Amino acid sequence: MNLFHYTDVAAIKAILEFNKMRLTDMRYLNDSEEVSYATRMVLEDINDGKLLHRLSKDYADLATDYVVGQFKTLMENKFSGHPIYSLSFSAAGDLLSQWRSYGSYSIEIDSEKWEVHLTRCLYDPKDAKARLFMPTVEALRAVGRDLRDYAGRVEYIGTESYMDLVKLIASVKHPGFSEEQEWRLLLDERSPHVDSAQYRVRSDMLIPYVEVPIPIECIVAVHVGPMKYQDMAFESLKEFVEGLSQIRCLDTPIKVVRSSIPYRTA
């Protein structure tokens, strides 16, 4: 599947030169609701008792109290202390809202050539609840068994299952963003990449991010979005990419493509 990462020209140049892509700490993404939206969805199902019949009576209360408490603490602290880093792609290759929101360029990748796990975001609440149902049950079971068997402590299996659920929650978005057709590369604190977090400047604050390598063979094309001087931008980018392709001796050259959307001033 080919996916598109919308960004600015500086990021495009850096990705092509250094074969790395940045994942941003989700606390600093554009949608302030991001992880909290799906967390409330899971809490609603737990508090409604919809999952209790799936749990053993000897740990059901312990597990639900623990997980509800952990989620509430995460939300109160705006997920500080439990970083999740995200890199976004879209299945839509020429989408005006993406050009307006993220930059005038996009990089097109062949996801099957990149050995990472990309997760498709869900926007429909029914689909989201279906995706989260069994992982929530499994997390409650693992946490509950640990609390029962280890004198009130959550050990490795319970912790891993809980963290898997939190990471999965990050693939659920509000229906209002469905146009984006988003896929995500998600990393949490278990990833070795997170140990080397860096910071970039945005406006008047520092934004945490991590970098992951991407083989240049995964990059299919670079797209130039609607802009005032699109022809000039296209020509200079084409020269840059052609020179890079020759230096890297690529079997399949990277294409440079113009957006078909006409440019209009705001």
Image (tube, rainbow, N blue to C red):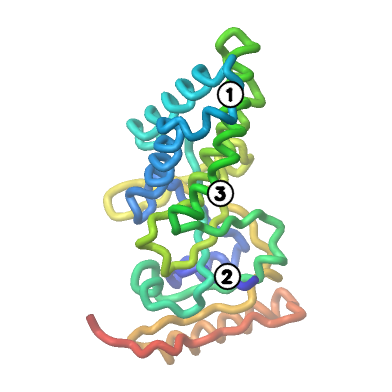
- Residue 255 quadrant: bottom right
| Amino acid type, label 3 | Arg
Q: Position of residue 154 (x, y in %)?
A: 58, 19
Residue marked by disc 2: 3
**Alpha carbons under labels 1 and 2: distance apart:** 36 Å
Q: Which of pointers 2 and 3 indicates the residue nearer the eye?
A: 3
User: Which label's residue is closer to the chain start, 2 or 3?
Assistant: 2
Q: Report the residue at 59% width, 67% height from top.
A: 17
Under tag 2, what secondary structure? Answer: strand
> Compared with residue 156, is residue 129 higher up or lower down, i.e. above or below?
below
Q: Report the residue at 43% width, 45% height from top.
A: 38
Q: Residues within 10 Å of mark 2 (few under 14, many from 20)?
A: many
Q: Which of pointers 3 and 1 indicates the residue nearer the eye?
A: 3
How many marks do you count on the picture?
A: 3
| Amino acid type, label 1 | Val
Under tag 1, what secondary structure? Answer: helix
Left or right? Give the position of 15 relative to 218: left
> Compared with residue 245, is residue 38 higher up or lower down, i.e. above or below?
above
User: Which label's residue is closer to the chain start, 1 or 2?
Assistant: 2
Residue marked by disc 1: 143
Residue marked by disc 3: 131
Q: Position of residue 45 (x, y in %)?
A: 44, 37
